Amino acid sequence: MPSPAQSEAVPATPVHYARRGRVGVITVDNPPVNALGHGVRSGLAAALAAGLDDAESDMLLLVCTGRTFMAGADIREFGKPSAPPTLPELVARFDAATKPVIAVLHGSALGGGLELALACHVRVALTGARLGLPEVKLGLLPGAGGTQRLPRLVGAAKALDLILSGEPVGAEEALALGLVDAVEERGSPLEAGLCAAGRLAAEKRTPLPVSARNDRIAETDPALFIERRAELARRLPHLVSPHRIVDAVEAAVTLPFADGMARERALFRDCMDSPQRAGLIHAFFAEREVAKVPGLPAGTPTRDIREAGVVGAGTMGGGIAMCFANAGIPVTLLDLSQEALDRGIATIRRSYEASAGKGRLTLAQVGERMALIRPTLSHGDLAGADLVVEAAFESMAVKQAVFRKLDGVCKPGAILATNSSTLDVDAIAAATGRPQDVLGLHFFSPATIMRLLEVVRGAQTSDIVLATAMALARRIGKVGVAVGVCDGFVGNRILRQRGREAMALVEAGASPEQVDRVLTGFGFPLGHFAMTDLAGIDVGWRIREERRTAGDPEAEAPDWLDVLAERGRYGQKTGAGVYRYEPGSRKPLPDPELAALIAADRSRRGIAPRLVGDDEVRDRCLYVMVNEAAKILEEGIAARPVDIDAIWLHGYGFPSWRGGLLFWAEREGLGRIATAVQRYQRDIGGPQWCPSALLLKCAAAGRPIGC
Ligand code: T1G
């Protein structure tokens, strides 16, 4: 580490030390998020030592350059040997510093970054800073003293809230909690830090290290931990780290600091060794990896989307319009009838007002967003839109007519996107004279909640249009995944096969409740049939009818789901579907009428119901998904396994602690899956059990799928 006098000639290290007056400044410069990788940790250790040895400085500042403070340990290093100084070792050195250290937090101070700041004597947050310990989202717990220091600043109950949720708090809330000592509204981190140093110098005192403060934990009621454990046993029985977090915070309250730190370390190792940590970290990076589309040249220009349009003011169209308004993009919402338009706008307003009622929006924000949504009956009002999303009836004939109309009214270069969930984007593009500007933007219901956006590239979709759509996905807070054209694209194509198996298992003798229980036990938030009721049985029914009309050789034969649809039992929206629902409740209740219908269906088919075990339900529902995913990779409809993982994580609630469908399949064993698929092909048959050649090849070679 160069001496302070040489600080101007600092080599390109991610950390450097310089003095401003009597204040030593430690600066971390490790873009993009100042992650605490080995280089940063050793740089910080050296800079701290230099500062403590610097007789010309009375106190030290810890600041970061760029858009954010330290965003935590370097997640990419997990699972590899941790070179010294480890993060806990580094944090302990800051805790033991013989001079006051002031940390200045801006942007995101997260995980190990916040833990390092907690070991400093004073914390100053810039307005707009976000402070949090999100380790639980990675299947971990704060492993550098966060579970021991945070309770000493904010109390054990609030510390549990923050660490178990993993959600950050803003600067003002952090100040109110006692997490930071001051909030600065103006200036750079360095300027704010120098101001804080001046205040501290004037006070002529050295604040007690957090590790030595016990006043906020002294009166903690032991019942707090009993209550939290009971709540976790109800809510998250299958997850590891939340339960370990309660143990660690309890240690902060019941043990001397050093023993608490040792306890935290042991619990952190438990979490680190759990497969859930590997799954959650894969899911973290998957969300970012899919934004980089193979074959799309980096730096492909994008078109500016200043104004959007949506055709169709129904549930999806209204939700899509809200996605644009929420991102500050003016959007014209068109429907064919005033009644449909009024209904759509009223639904949007009710949704925003409900958010305001929950404190998620202010009434002013409701007004601002409503003002961004311009209803119209006239296609001409779409002339200025840079992008229009069609969310009309799921019928090819209807969509082609809409696109012909849009092609005539929209300006040259406007992007025309269909929200179709399954139909052929190329056939829709062919209805226009601008196929290079046409693609699919498949939103998932509820559009304002589900983060997945399947970006469906047509045969003639240009790179610029694809790049524009991927950038738009990020801008509206979606996880955009580029996929190719086929029936159902990626997500629904896999879901269709799971649906086939779910129906076949019920036909054989299982009940819908059993199938759903096995899937929720695996970690899905909803079972297959409960999800069907939520989406609406009529939606799938119309798609199956469309396939039969089109003569699709793989179209499903009419089944008891179709009978439910014909009886108007669409699911939650009609109060009854596969399950029945009490008025105002979304809780699925078994319905004897359905059991009779299934029994009659089996009888009509001459099937004597048999006992179906849970293992068979699990394997058939999940392995058919893996087999279809492998076929999708073979056909190039998805470019990588990570794309399929991201789609099922963000569009269908695949349990994130299992990493994703294909990440899980690797751990389940491709050999085991391939053998089962071949067995089911022999015993059950059907196109869904025709083994994927890629699956068989990778299983035989003992290689990960897609490699
Ligand atoms: N480690 C390594 N890379 C990271 C990273 C991290 N902690 N955080 C982000 N990146 C990469 C990311 O993959 C992307 O890479 C680029 O930085 C920009 O990220 C002991 C054990 C900080 C809010 O969980 O929440 O500390 O794609 O696209 O939208 O107790 O990144 O450009 O190649 O997300 O502006 C705890 C995770 C770690 C924070 C910024 N910390 N990061 O969001 O940018 S565990 C976290 C985030 C820990 C200690 C424990 C976000 C962000 P690429 P980005 P962003």
Image: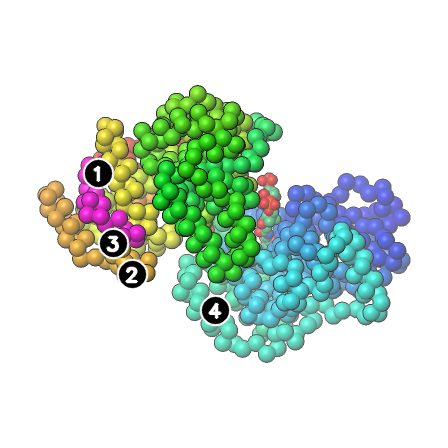
Residue marked by disc 3: 576
Which region is colored magenta?
555-574
Q: Check the image and report above or below for 467 versus 561.
A: above
Q: Check the image and report above or below for 591 versus 410.
A: below
Q: Check the image and report above or below for 356 versus 397.
A: below
Residue 610 horizontal/vertical position (percent): 16, 50
Mark pair 2, 1: CA separation: 40 Å
Instruction: State the SS at label 4.
Output: helix
Q: Quadrant of residue 177?
A: bottom right
3 vs 4, front mark: 3
Lateral position of residue 248 relative to residue 404, left or right: right
Name the residue located 43 percent from the left edge and 45 percent from the top edge: 319
Name the residue located 53 percent from the left edge and 52 percent from the top edge: 367
Residue marked by disc 1: 684
Residue marked by disc 4: 228
Mark 2 residue type: Pro
Name the residue located 48 percent from the left edge and 42 percent from the top edge: 374
Q: Check the image and report above or below for 704 versus 206.
A: above
Q: Is residue 239 visible?
A: yes
Residue marked by disc 2: 583
Q: Residues within 10 Å of mark 4 (few under 14, many from 20)?
A: some
2 vs 3, front mark: 2
Q: Earlier in the sequence, mark 4 or mark 1?
A: 4
